[in-house]
């Protein structure tokens, strides 16, 4: 199995940028479909972005054009570059790994098997 540790969260003003990192150990991230989720207070966990084993990417409409997911196999790390941040992006962001092959367009948190502890992102207006 894989262990995931997120970092890079923090407080940023609207319009700013952050880069989240998800460092993996135990197994290589390229053997999983990897995803980023977020959960705001009082809301359900939302699938934000994913990167498949071959490197295909997916973005929720709410972040398309602003967020970029990438993977560094040598560092065994997945990144989420977040630009043009908005107050509604405020949430705890989680990295997750899927052992299966669920299409990202259908994926929910139940499809992902391994999770990090989360990192807080707060965007002030």
Image: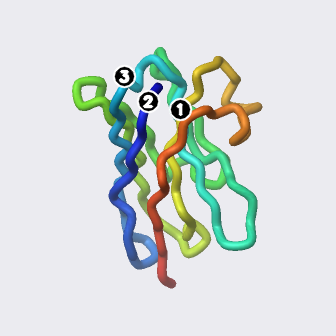
Nearer to us of marks 1 and 2 is 2
Please determine whether, in this image, residue 83 is positioned above or below residue 121. Answer: above
Mark 3: few/some/many CA within 10 Å (<14, 14-19, 20+): some
- Per the image, the residue denoted by label 2 is 2
Q: Residue 20: which numbered mark, if any?
A: none
Q: Residue at x 46, y 67 (%)?
A: 121
Q: Position of residue 49 (x, y in %)?
A: 56, 41
Q: Residue at x 69, y 24 (%)?
A: 103
Residue 55 screen position, x and y as percent: 46, 21
Which of labels 3 and 2 is toward the front?
A: 2
Looking at the picture, how far across and down is residue 42, in whole percent? 74, 72
Of labels 3 and 2, earlier in sequence is 2
State the residue position of label 3. 28
Q: Is residue 86 left or right of residue 11?
A: right
Q: 11 or 58: nearer the eye? A: 11
What is the CA distance from the residue labelled 3 to the residue labelled 2? 8 Å
Sequence-wise, the earlier of marks 1 and 2 is 2
The answer to whether mark 1 and mark 2 are in CB contact below 8 A is: yes
Tell me the colour scheme of the image: rainbow
Would you say the residues marked 3 and 1 are in contact, meaning their CB atoms lie under 8 Å apart?
no
Q: Earlier in the sequence, mark 3 or mark 1?
A: 3
Q: Nearer the viewer, residue 10 or 85?
A: 10
The front one of 96 and 83 is: 96
Q: Which residue is mark 1?
A: 97
Determine whether the residue tagged by mark 3 lies in a helix, strand or loop. loop
Residue appearing at x 55%, y 36% in the figure: 114
Q: CA distance from mark 3 to mark 1?
A: 10 Å
Q: Is residue 42 left or right of residue 118?
A: right
SS category of the residue bearing label 2: loop
């Amino acid at each position: 199995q894989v262990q995931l540790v997120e970092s890079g969260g923090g407080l940023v003003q609207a319009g700013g940028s952050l880069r989240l990192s998800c460092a993996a150990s135990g197994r290589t991230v390229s053997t999983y479909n990897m995803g980023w989720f977020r959960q705001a207070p009082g809301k359900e966990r939302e699938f934000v972005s994913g990167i498949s084993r071959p490197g295909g990417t997916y973005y929720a409409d709410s972040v398309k054009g602003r967020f970029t997911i990438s993977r560094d196999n040598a560092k065994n790390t997945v990144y989420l570059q977040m630009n043009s941040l908005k107050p509604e992006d405020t949430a705890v962001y989680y990295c997750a790994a899927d052992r299966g092959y669920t299409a990202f367009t259908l994926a929910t948190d139940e499809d992902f098997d391994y999770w990090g502890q989360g990192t807080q992102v707060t965007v002030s207006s």
